[in-house]
Image (cartoon, grey):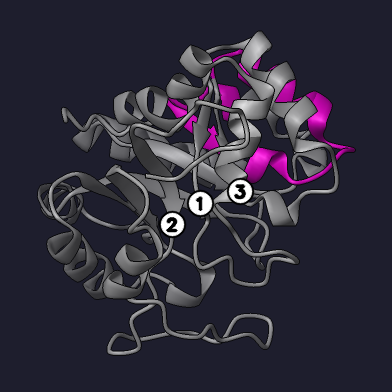
Amino acid sequence: MINLKKEGNKITKLFDAHLHIIDPVFPLIENEGFQPEPFTCDDYMQKMKKIELAGGAVVSGSFQGHDQTYLVEALRKLGGNFAGVTQIPHDTSEEEIINLHEAGVRAVRFNLRRGGRADVTSMRQLADKVYMTAGWHAEIYADAKNLNDQASDILKMPAVSLDHLGLSREGFRNVLYFAEKGVKIKASGFGRVDFDVVKAVKEIYQANPEALMFGTDLPSTRAERPYSHADIDVIYEALTEREAEDVLFKNALTWYRKGI
Protein backbone atom coordinates (compact mmCIF):
# COMPACT_ATOMS: atom_id res chain seq x y z
CA MET A 1 0.00 0.00 0.00
CA ILE A 2 1.10 3.55 -0.63
CA ASN A 3 1.10 6.19 2.08
CA LEU A 4 -0.56 9.38 0.96
CA LYS A 5 0.08 12.99 1.95
CA LYS A 6 -3.03 13.27 4.10
CA GLU A 7 -2.18 11.62 7.40
CA GLY A 8 -3.96 8.33 7.93
CA ASN A 9 -5.09 7.93 4.33
CA LYS A 10 -4.20 4.97 2.19
CA ILE A 11 -5.53 4.10 -1.20
CA THR A 12 -7.68 0.98 -0.98
CA LYS A 13 -8.43 0.39 -4.65
CA LEU A 14 -7.53 1.96 -7.97
CA PHE A 15 -9.13 1.36 -11.33
CA ASP A 16 -6.58 2.97 -13.65
CA ALA A 17 -8.75 4.64 -16.29
CA HIS A 18 -5.90 5.49 -18.67
CA LEU A 19 -2.73 3.53 -19.39
CA HIS A 20 -0.75 2.54 -22.46
CA ILE A 21 1.02 -0.72 -23.24
CA ILE A 22 3.84 -0.49 -25.78
CA ASP A 23 5.04 -3.94 -26.78
CA PRO A 24 7.77 -3.83 -29.47
CA VAL A 25 6.72 -7.29 -30.67
CA PHE A 26 3.75 -5.57 -32.34
CA PRO A 27 3.67 -2.85 -35.04
CA LEU A 28 4.43 0.75 -34.05
CA ILE A 29 3.98 3.81 -36.23
CA GLU A 30 6.20 6.87 -35.99
CA ASN A 31 3.99 9.85 -35.15
CA GLU A 32 5.21 13.41 -35.66
CA GLY A 33 8.78 12.09 -35.56
CA PHE A 34 8.17 10.19 -32.31
CA GLN A 35 8.33 6.48 -31.60
CA PRO A 36 7.93 5.40 -27.97
CA GLU A 37 10.16 3.22 -25.85
CA PRO A 38 8.79 -0.20 -24.84
CA PHE A 39 6.44 -0.40 -21.86
CA THR A 40 5.12 -3.92 -21.53
CA CYS A 41 2.44 -5.46 -19.33
CA ASP A 42 5.19 -6.64 -16.99
CA ASP A 43 6.63 -3.11 -16.84
CA TYR A 44 3.20 -1.73 -15.94
CA MET A 45 2.54 -4.26 -13.20
CA GLN A 46 6.00 -3.66 -11.75
CA LYS A 47 5.38 0.09 -11.69
CA MET A 48 2.04 -0.40 -9.93
CA LYS A 49 3.11 -3.09 -7.46
CA LYS A 50 2.60 -0.81 -4.43
CA ILE A 51 -0.99 -0.05 -5.43
CA GLU A 52 -4.00 -2.28 -4.85
CA LEU A 53 -4.92 -2.39 -8.51
CA ALA A 54 -8.49 -3.40 -9.27
CA GLY A 55 -8.21 -3.08 -13.05
CA GLY A 56 -7.73 -0.49 -15.73
CA ALA A 57 -8.22 0.71 -19.29
CA VAL A 58 -5.53 0.04 -21.91
CA VAL A 59 -5.72 2.93 -24.37
CA SER A 60 -4.43 2.80 -27.95
CA GLY A 61 -1.99 5.58 -28.78
CA SER A 62 -1.39 7.40 -32.06
CA PHE A 63 1.75 5.31 -32.55
CA GLN A 64 -0.36 2.13 -32.66
CA GLY A 65 -2.73 3.20 -35.40
CA HIS A 66 -5.45 0.64 -36.06
CA ASP A 67 -3.42 -2.35 -34.86
CA GLN A 68 -5.55 -4.59 -32.65
CA THR A 69 -3.06 -7.41 -32.10
CA TYR A 70 -1.14 -5.64 -29.33
CA LEU A 71 -4.37 -4.67 -27.54
CA VAL A 72 -5.93 -8.12 -27.63
CA GLU A 73 -2.70 -9.64 -26.31
CA ALA A 74 -2.34 -6.99 -23.58
CA LEU A 75 -5.88 -7.62 -22.39
CA ARG A 76 -5.23 -11.36 -22.36
CA LYS A 77 -2.10 -10.89 -20.24
CA LEU A 78 -3.58 -8.34 -17.83
CA GLY A 79 -6.79 -10.27 -17.26
CA GLY A 80 -10.52 -9.71 -17.23
CA ASN A 81 -10.47 -6.68 -14.93
CA PHE A 82 -8.90 -4.61 -17.71
CA ALA A 83 -10.75 -3.02 -20.62
CA GLY A 84 -9.47 -1.89 -24.01
CA VAL A 85 -9.87 1.46 -25.75
CA THR A 86 -9.16 1.05 -29.44
CA GLN A 87 -8.78 3.02 -32.65
CA ILE A 88 -10.62 1.56 -35.64
CA PRO A 89 -11.40 2.65 -39.21
CA HIS A 90 -14.86 4.00 -39.83
CA ASP A 91 -15.67 1.06 -42.10
CA THR A 92 -14.98 -1.55 -39.42
CA SER A 93 -17.68 -4.20 -39.60
CA GLU A 94 -20.10 -5.02 -36.81
CA GLU A 95 -18.59 -8.51 -36.69
CA GLU A 96 -15.13 -7.08 -36.06
CA ILE A 97 -16.49 -4.81 -33.32
CA ILE A 98 -18.18 -7.76 -31.62
CA ASN A 99 -14.96 -9.79 -31.82
CA LEU A 100 -13.06 -6.95 -30.16
CA HIS A 101 -15.76 -6.65 -27.52
CA GLU A 102 -15.37 -10.33 -26.70
CA ALA A 103 -11.63 -9.70 -26.28
CA GLY A 104 -12.37 -6.99 -23.69
CA VAL A 105 -12.54 -3.77 -25.72
CA ARG A 106 -15.10 -1.29 -24.40
CA ALA A 107 -14.48 2.01 -26.20
CA VAL A 108 -13.29 3.71 -29.37
CA ARG A 109 -10.80 6.58 -29.21
CA PHE A 110 -10.68 9.71 -31.36
CA ASN A 111 -7.22 11.27 -31.21
CA LEU A 112 -7.50 14.91 -32.31
CA ARG A 113 -4.29 15.91 -30.56
CA ARG A 114 -1.76 13.91 -32.57
CA GLY A 115 -2.59 14.63 -36.19
CA GLY A 116 -6.24 13.60 -36.06
CA ARG A 117 -8.91 15.56 -37.91
CA ALA A 118 -11.97 16.93 -36.15
CA ASP A 119 -14.49 15.45 -38.60
CA VAL A 120 -17.29 15.45 -36.09
CA THR A 121 -19.84 13.95 -38.47
CA SER A 122 -17.67 10.87 -39.02
CA MET A 123 -16.88 10.71 -35.32
CA ARG A 124 -20.56 10.73 -34.43
CA GLN A 125 -21.33 8.06 -37.00
CA LEU A 126 -18.67 5.74 -35.60
CA ALA A 127 -19.62 6.55 -32.00
CA ASP A 128 -23.23 5.65 -32.79
CA LYS A 129 -22.16 2.48 -34.59
CA VAL A 130 -20.01 1.06 -31.78
CA TYR A 131 -22.59 2.02 -29.16
CA MET A 132 -25.43 0.33 -31.03
CA THR A 133 -23.32 -2.74 -31.84
CA ALA A 134 -21.56 -3.36 -28.54
CA GLY A 135 -22.48 -0.62 -26.06
CA TRP A 136 -19.09 1.06 -26.35
CA HIS A 137 -18.50 4.68 -25.44
CA ALA A 138 -16.23 7.15 -27.25
CA GLU A 139 -13.08 8.74 -25.83
CA ILE A 140 -11.69 12.02 -27.16
CA TYR A 141 -8.10 13.20 -26.87
CA ALA A 142 -8.07 16.90 -27.67
CA ASP A 143 -7.26 20.27 -26.21
CA ALA A 144 -10.63 21.40 -24.91
CA LYS A 145 -9.98 24.95 -26.11
CA ASN A 146 -10.36 23.62 -29.66
CA LEU A 147 -13.76 22.02 -29.06
CA ASN A 148 -15.98 25.11 -29.05
CA ASP A 149 -17.44 24.40 -32.49
CA GLN A 150 -17.74 20.66 -31.86
CA ALA A 151 -19.35 20.78 -28.41
CA SER A 152 -22.96 20.32 -29.51
CA ASP A 153 -22.07 17.38 -31.74
CA ILE A 154 -19.94 15.75 -29.04
CA LEU A 155 -22.86 15.97 -26.63
CA LYS A 156 -25.03 14.13 -29.15
CA MET A 157 -22.77 11.07 -28.96
CA PRO A 158 -24.39 8.28 -26.92
CA ALA A 159 -21.60 8.20 -24.33
CA VAL A 160 -18.29 10.07 -24.31
CA SER A 161 -15.25 10.91 -22.18
CA LEU A 162 -12.47 13.49 -22.49
CA ASP A 163 -8.81 12.75 -21.79
CA HIS A 164 -6.34 14.50 -19.48
CA LEU A 165 -8.64 17.14 -17.92
CA GLY A 166 -8.92 18.77 -21.34
CA LEU A 167 -5.23 19.75 -21.24
CA SER A 168 -5.40 23.56 -21.12
CA ARG A 169 -6.40 26.39 -18.83
CA GLU A 170 -7.95 28.11 -21.85
CA GLY A 171 -10.24 25.14 -22.46
CA PHE A 172 -11.22 24.48 -18.85
CA ARG A 173 -14.54 26.28 -19.13
CA ASN A 174 -15.46 23.77 -21.85
CA VAL A 175 -14.40 20.91 -19.56
CA LEU A 176 -16.74 22.10 -16.81
CA TYR A 177 -19.55 22.47 -19.35
CA PHE A 178 -18.99 18.95 -20.63
CA ALA A 179 -18.92 17.55 -17.08
CA GLU A 180 -22.19 19.29 -16.24
CA LYS A 181 -23.74 17.70 -19.35
CA GLY A 182 -22.64 14.18 -18.39
CA VAL A 183 -19.34 13.78 -20.22
CA LYS A 184 -16.78 11.79 -18.24
CA ILE A 185 -13.45 13.54 -17.61
CA LYS A 186 -10.21 11.64 -17.12
CA ALA A 187 -8.11 12.99 -14.26
CA SER A 188 -4.93 11.84 -15.96
CA GLY A 189 -1.78 13.22 -17.53
CA PHE A 190 -1.11 15.80 -14.82
CA GLY A 191 2.28 16.43 -16.40
CA ARG A 192 0.56 17.57 -19.59
CA VAL A 193 -1.70 20.33 -18.23
CA ASP A 194 -0.99 24.03 -17.64
CA PHE A 195 -3.23 24.67 -14.62
CA ASP A 196 -3.70 23.85 -10.94
CA VAL A 197 -4.87 20.23 -10.88
CA VAL A 198 -6.13 20.33 -7.28
CA LYS A 199 -8.40 23.27 -8.05
CA ALA A 200 -9.56 21.68 -11.30
CA VAL A 201 -10.44 18.39 -9.62
CA LYS A 202 -12.47 20.21 -6.97
CA GLU A 203 -14.42 22.20 -9.57
CA ILE A 204 -15.14 19.23 -11.83
CA TYR A 205 -16.26 17.07 -8.91
CA GLN A 206 -18.57 19.85 -7.76
CA ALA A 207 -20.00 20.13 -11.28
CA ASN A 208 -20.63 16.38 -11.52
CA PRO A 209 -19.49 13.86 -8.87
CA GLU A 210 -19.76 11.02 -11.40
CA ALA A 211 -17.58 12.63 -14.07
CA LEU A 212 -13.99 12.25 -12.88
CA MET A 213 -11.95 9.07 -13.39
CA PHE A 214 -8.30 8.88 -12.36
CA GLY A 215 -5.73 7.45 -14.75
CA THR A 216 -1.97 7.11 -14.49
CA ASP A 217 -1.31 7.82 -18.19
CA LEU A 218 1.65 5.45 -17.90
CA PRO A 219 4.23 5.47 -19.39
CA SER A 220 3.49 9.19 -19.94
CA THR A 221 4.91 9.38 -23.46
CA ARG A 222 5.83 12.94 -24.49
CA ALA A 223 4.59 14.39 -21.18
CA GLU A 224 6.65 17.16 -19.58
CA ARG A 225 6.45 15.27 -16.29
CA PRO A 226 5.77 11.52 -16.09
CA TYR A 227 3.29 9.95 -13.71
CA SER A 228 4.33 9.30 -10.13
CA HIS A 229 2.34 7.84 -7.24
CA ALA A 230 2.25 11.36 -5.78
CA ASP A 231 -0.40 12.08 -8.43
CA ILE A 232 -2.78 9.96 -6.35
CA ASP A 233 -2.12 12.28 -3.41
CA VAL A 234 -3.46 15.13 -5.53
CA ILE A 235 -6.89 13.51 -5.55
CA TYR A 236 -6.88 13.13 -1.76
CA GLU A 237 -5.72 16.73 -1.40
CA ALA A 238 -8.62 17.96 -3.51
CA LEU A 239 -11.40 15.74 -2.16
CA THR A 240 -12.65 13.94 0.92
CA GLU A 241 -11.77 10.27 1.30
CA ARG A 242 -15.24 9.20 0.16
CA GLU A 243 -15.14 11.52 -2.84
CA ALA A 244 -11.65 10.32 -3.73
CA GLU A 245 -12.94 6.75 -3.85
CA ASP A 246 -15.39 7.83 -6.56
CA VAL A 247 -12.58 9.28 -8.66
CA LEU A 248 -10.00 6.56 -8.04
CA PHE A 249 -12.27 3.57 -8.36
CA LYS A 250 -16.05 3.72 -8.54
CA ASN A 251 -16.68 6.04 -11.48
CA ALA A 252 -14.32 4.24 -13.86
CA LEU A 253 -15.51 0.83 -12.73
CA THR A 254 -19.04 1.80 -13.75
CA TRP A 255 -17.90 3.46 -16.99
CA TYR A 256 -15.98 0.43 -18.19
CA ARG A 257 -18.64 -1.91 -16.78
CA LYS A 258 -16.23 -4.11 -14.89
CA GLY A 259 -18.12 -5.91 -12.12
CA ILE A 260 -15.26 -6.43 -9.71
Q: Residue at x 79, y 26 (%)?
A: 199
Tell whether 103 sits left or right of 194: left
Q: Residue 234: x and y, percent? A: 65, 36
Which disc number belongs to residue 216? Answer: 1
Q: Amino acid at mark 1?
A: Thr
Q: Residue 64: x and y, percent? A: 43, 74
Mark 3 lies on residue: 230
Q: Magenta stretch containing residue 168, yes or no? A: yes
Mark 2 lies on residue: 19
Q: Residue 241: x and y, percent? A: 51, 17
Q: Which mark is first along the chain, 3 or 2?
A: 2
Q: Secondary structure at mark 1?
A: loop
Q: Secondary structure at mark 2?
A: strand
Q: Amino acid at mark 3?
A: Ala
Q: Nearer the viewer, residue 130 or 72?
A: 72
Residue 32 at least partly seen: yes
Q: Amino acid at mark 2?
A: Leu
Q: Nearer the viewer, residue 131 or 11?
A: 11
- Pointer 2 with pointer 1, Cβ within 8 A: yes
Comparing labels 2 and 3, the label whose residue is closer to the camera: 3
Looking at the rendering, the stretch of residues picked out in magenta corresponds to: 154-182
Q: Which mark is first along the chain, 1 or 2?
A: 2
Q: Which mark is first along the chain, 3 or 1?
A: 1
Q: Residue at x 61, y 29 (%)?
A: 6
